[in-house]
């Protein structure tokens, strides 16, 4: 039985790896269940077992999937802070060390034998757009089609994740044998930059390139980063060849192919710390394929003020943690040496020091996520196995209380069901039409929270009313015998500038009566029953009252606003025929929607 899943971030990147390549690299075969178990033990999750064909047919229909590959792909969810597991190479390395089949590799920065270190010079113009850059060389590397795909895919994963869609860092990788250093990273007016972008057959100016990619499904998302700047960043070699115009596109001249032997890696950035991490991850992952495994050739970066830095840093650092602290925090009682062994299995080489009262841990350059002792303790817990931790009864007795709002919701649910209404649970997201056009209001007046990149038209905004969900439920159940009496008590979401996230949830109660006659008296009776349950008498001062009101969703002259506790809490009435037809219904309908939070 699984009683725990390890999650360190809400938005977990998914790594897709070909099953055959994975098993080949791991040196053994697994059944799908065994591999799922292995992922779980390592704090990952095997999200899906699929193939290119399945993915295309799911997204675009079976017709489009003709001729697509049947190769089985594992989609693995990786915690968002584990940049070292975002590609097949890092994943296999992590798993092999975890299973104690190999020791964690030692990454080394080396200076070129002939002393001709590659140099990148940063000019002061870059300060206005992207002030930082780091660089390195992968020397004598051997690519295959799969390695090359993995190399490109890792860059994409990093761009989406730590690079914050290239806003903080943008990675450029170039065939070093097609260019000659030293390289210059500068910024120029767009009209002065001319080059042939990646996979294009002719030269464009920077302004033309921006227009060219305005419709590109992938690159259009990055144009805004530099679009309105007076100068655009650009990297030249000593002969004036353009390597790239970060963060948009590389030049076609330096394009990497399967025959590339030497790769020049540059990362331009607005955040130098992130840039160092990205460079470290990229070169450590693929240095495995260099002639001298796990070595990276250094590059020198010179700022306009004369300051010089050597990259990649590939810095190892040491941390000390007391074994007692690890045991106490996890709730286990392991010896210091076995704790050190557990950490070593997580690529954190550890040994016991000072009569066993300290563990010294070496943090490799691949583990930028280790910031504090608690990160080390978490890794020890993963290696120990969450399911192996004995459950114990806490030493302190505390009595839990239900959250008041949920308690009120539960009580109301019981009584609404007793009043003959059926509960429905509908989606918290809906289309813009549902909460605006169909109810006869403008979307801008709804205070709706919009989703930036909705995957479907059905889920564009968070609902600002429970009514559309219930009307859609009735439309889907038109064949059921009349009358239909439905209710829902759930959260709606509205924009609220006073909240730190810019929006707030509000618990609403909505009920609908659908029959051959509108049944306003049924809904009005339900309101009286709800108020009776909440011990709110019908009175102007201290209780509740209803006043005639106008609302585009309701029939003129058949709508009332409900006031209680001195404030407006919602409306009830007979729905407008236009609203009913827009939700594909044919009978009259009356509804009630109120906010129940004031009654807590």
Image: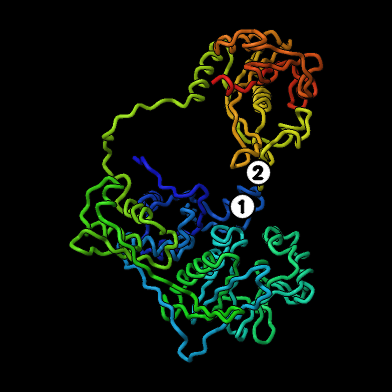
339 lies left or right of 224: left
Q: Which of marks 1 and 2 is in front?
A: 2
As drawn, the label of residue 278 is none
What percent of the width, then of the height, locates residue 279? Answer: 51, 70
316 lies left or right of 434: left
Badge 1 density bin: few <14, some 14–19, many ≥20, Cα 10 Å: some
Q: In the rendered view, would you say 311 is above or below 52?
A: below
Badge 2 density bin: few <14, some 14–19, many ≥20, Cα 10 Å: few
Q: Which of 528 and 208 is in front in this view?
A: 528
243 lies left or right of 21: right
The colour scheme used here is rainbow
What percent of the width, then of the height, locates residue 234? Answer: 68, 74
Residue occupying the point 67% across, 31% down = 464
Q: Which of marks 1 and 2 is nearer the N terminus?
A: 1
State which quadrant residue 459 falls in.
top right
Residue occupying the point 31% across, 44% down = 387
Q: Does residue 225 appear in the picture of this structure?
A: yes
User: Regarding mark 2 in the picture, which secondary structure is present there?
Assistant: loop
Q: Which of 80 and 131 is in front in this view?
A: 131
User: Regarding mark 1 in the picture, which secondary structure is present there?
Assistant: helix
What percent of the width, then of the height, locates residue 64? Answer: 66, 53
As drawn, the label of residue 451 is 2
**Residue underneath mark 1:** 56
What percent of the width, then of the height, locates residue 178? Answer: 62, 84
């Amino acid at each position: 039985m699984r009683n725990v899943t390890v999650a360190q971030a809400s938005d977990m990147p998914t790594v897709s790896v070909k099953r055959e390549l994975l098993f080949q690299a791991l040196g053994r075969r697994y059944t799908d269940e065994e591999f799922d178990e292995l992922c779980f033990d390592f704090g990952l999750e095997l999200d899906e077992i699929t193939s290119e064909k399945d993915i295309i047919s799911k997204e675009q229909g079976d017709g489009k999937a003709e001729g697509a590959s049947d190769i089985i792909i594992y989609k693995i969810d990786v915690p968002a802070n584990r940049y070292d597991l975002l590609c097949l190479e890092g994943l296999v390395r992590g798993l092999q060390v975890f299973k104690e089949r190999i020791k964690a590799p030692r990454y080394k920065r080396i200076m070129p034998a002939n002393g001709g270190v590659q140099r990148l010079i940063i000019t002061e113009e870059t300060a206005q757009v992207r002030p930082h850059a780091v660089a390195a060389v992968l020397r004598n590397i051997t690519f295959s089609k799969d390695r090359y795909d993995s190399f490109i895919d890792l860059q994409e994963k990093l761009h989406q994740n730590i690079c914050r869609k290239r806003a903080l860092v943008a990675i450029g990788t170039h065939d070093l044998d097609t260019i000659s250093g030293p390289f210059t990273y500068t910024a120029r007016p767009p009209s002065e930059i001319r080059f042939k972008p990646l996979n294009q057959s002719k030269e464009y100016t920077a302004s033309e390139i921006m227009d060219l990619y305005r419709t590109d499904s992938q690159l259009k998302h990055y144009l805004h980063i530099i679009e309105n700047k007076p100068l655009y960043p650009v990297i030249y070699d000593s002969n004036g060849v353009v390597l790239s115009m970060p963060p948009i596109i590389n030049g076609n001249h330096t394009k990497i192919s399967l025959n590339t032997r030497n790769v020049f890696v540059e990362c331009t950035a607005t955040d130098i710390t992130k840039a160092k991490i990205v460079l470290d991850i990229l070169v450590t992952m693929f240095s495995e394929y260099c002639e001298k495994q796990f070595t990276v050739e250094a590059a020198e970066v010179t700022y306009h003020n004369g300051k010089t830095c050597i990259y990649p840093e590939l810095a190892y650092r040491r941390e000390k943690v007391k074994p007692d602290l690890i045991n106490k925090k996890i709730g286990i009682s392991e010896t210091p040496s076995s704790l050190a062994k557990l950490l070593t299995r997580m690529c954190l080489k550890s040994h016991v020091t000072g009569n066993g009262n300290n563990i010294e841990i070496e943090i490799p350059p691949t583990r930028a996520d280790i910031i504090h002792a608690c990160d080390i303790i978490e890794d020890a817990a993963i290696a120990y196995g969450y399911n192996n931790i004995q459950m114990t009864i806490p030493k302190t007795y505390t009595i839990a209380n239900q959250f008041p709002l949920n308690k009120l919701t539960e009580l109301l649910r019981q009584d609404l069901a007793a009043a003959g209404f059926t509960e429905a649970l509908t989606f918290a997201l809906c289309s813009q039409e549902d909460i605006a056009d169909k109810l006869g209001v403008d979307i801008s007046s709804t205070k709706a929270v919009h989703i930036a990149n909705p995957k479907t038209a059905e889920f564009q905004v968070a609902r600002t009313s429970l009514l559309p969900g219930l009307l859609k439920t009735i439309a889907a159940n038109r064949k059921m015998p009349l009358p239909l009496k439905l209710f829902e008590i759930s959260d709606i979401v509205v924009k609220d500038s006073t909240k730190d996230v810019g929006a707030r949830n509000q618990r609403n109660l909505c009920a609908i009566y659908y029959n051959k006659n509108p049944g306003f008296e049924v809904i009005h009776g339900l309101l009286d029953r709800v108020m009776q349950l909440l011990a709110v008498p019908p009175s102007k001062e201290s209780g509740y009252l209803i006043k005639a009101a106008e609302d585009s969703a309701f029939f003129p002259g058949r709508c009332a606003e409900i006031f209680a506790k001195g404030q407006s809490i919602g409306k009830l009435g007979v729905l407008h025929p236009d609203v009913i037809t827009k939700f594909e219904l044919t009978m009259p309908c009356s509804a009630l929607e109120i906010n129940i939070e004031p009654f807590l």
